[in-house]
Amino acid sequence: MKRSALITGITGQDGSYLAEFLLQANYRVFGLVRRSSTINFERIAHLQDKVELIPGDLLDPSSLMAALERSQPQEVYNLASQSFVPTSWSQPVLTGEFTALGVTRLLEAIRVVNPRIRFYQASSSEMFGMVEESPQTERTRFYPRSPYGIAKLYGHWMTVNYRESYGMFACSGILFNHESPRRGIEFVTRKVSYAVARIKSGLQDKLRMGNLEAERDWGFAGDYVRAMWLMLQQEKPQDYVVATGVAHSVRNVLEVAFGHAGLDYREYVEIDPQLTRPAEVHRLRGDYSKARRELGWAPQVSFEELIGIMVDSDLELLACTAPRLTVAASLP
């Protein structure tokens, strides 16, 4: 029989790549989606005849139990959350409901319906926050600096607690920043790649940015979903750092992205103090030695390749939409 997996957040960047990966591995894939008049299926449009979507909400325990009963999964991947860090300051309670308590509701639903289900929790490098050592490992002390990081830490420790309290196969991937052409346009790498494409196409003059010196460990989302799956194939549940081991500044992102399009970022970027965070995380760099040793995992796409792929994708996107915009503008 085919193995089944339920993915929360299937319409997001990671969810779409994970669904592709699991389908290629001959899984029956279910996705939890919130009922809404504005659901965006763009990232999984090419998969909608291959995945089975179930209505549900991390705020509603009964809908989670119903989704588990319907899908009967062997594996659950919890990728849903309010994941944009700046928004967590303006919406801290909502962030906590989805990103923290949502994990508890899902774990409890699994415990009630079928505690043998293997559970993956999407933890975040933002939990390290004001880091006390570099690079960060599974043993590094957490010091989150945003409501998002705090909420992720709650979900992380709740996953550990259900593992230790009930013997459930529950583990967390402490994923460092991972990007792709499917990244939301509000995230800094996609904000940059999309702006570069618009500037190159003559549609935009300037790009407003905040702190250019913040450093992150950026990898390719398509690489990282493979690590999620590998965690649930182990004999014992454990938590793993997933990263590239190399940190780059936001300034580096600008240099590579604009340079890929034959431009100099210094001619187009303006600093806007309003775009800085209330409490900054200055530098994150992960040590994925444990994942390499125990999972046999390593990143495949380099930072420069990733940024180039994103810029090319946004240039192609604009090239495809420009004719439609021109036609629309010419209509009476």
Image (cartoon, rainbow, N blue to C red):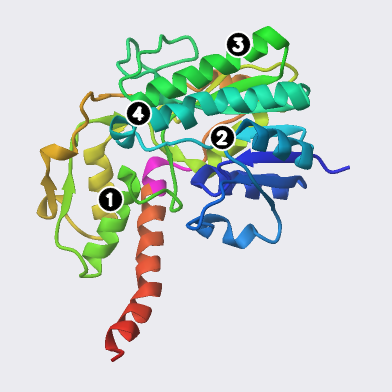
Q: How far across and down, in percent of the image, does residue 303 sit? A: 39, 41
Say which residue appears at 41% left-offset and 17% top-offset. 136
Disc 4: which residue: 92
**Residue 286 visible, this angle:** no
Q: Nearer the viewer, mark 2 or mark 3?
A: 2
Q: How far across and down, in percent of the image, does residue 26 sit? A: 77, 47
Disc 1: which residue: 192
State the CA–CA distance, disc 2 to disc 1: 31 Å
* Callout 2: SS: loop
Residue 298 vertical position relative to residue 327 in the rendered view, above or below: above
* Callout 1: SS: helix
Q: Nearer the viewer, residue 312 or 180?
A: 180
Disc 3: which residue: 161
The earlier-in-sequence mark between 3 and 1 is 3
**Three-letter amino acid code at disc 1?**
Val
Q: Nearer the viewer, mark 3 or mark 1?
A: 3
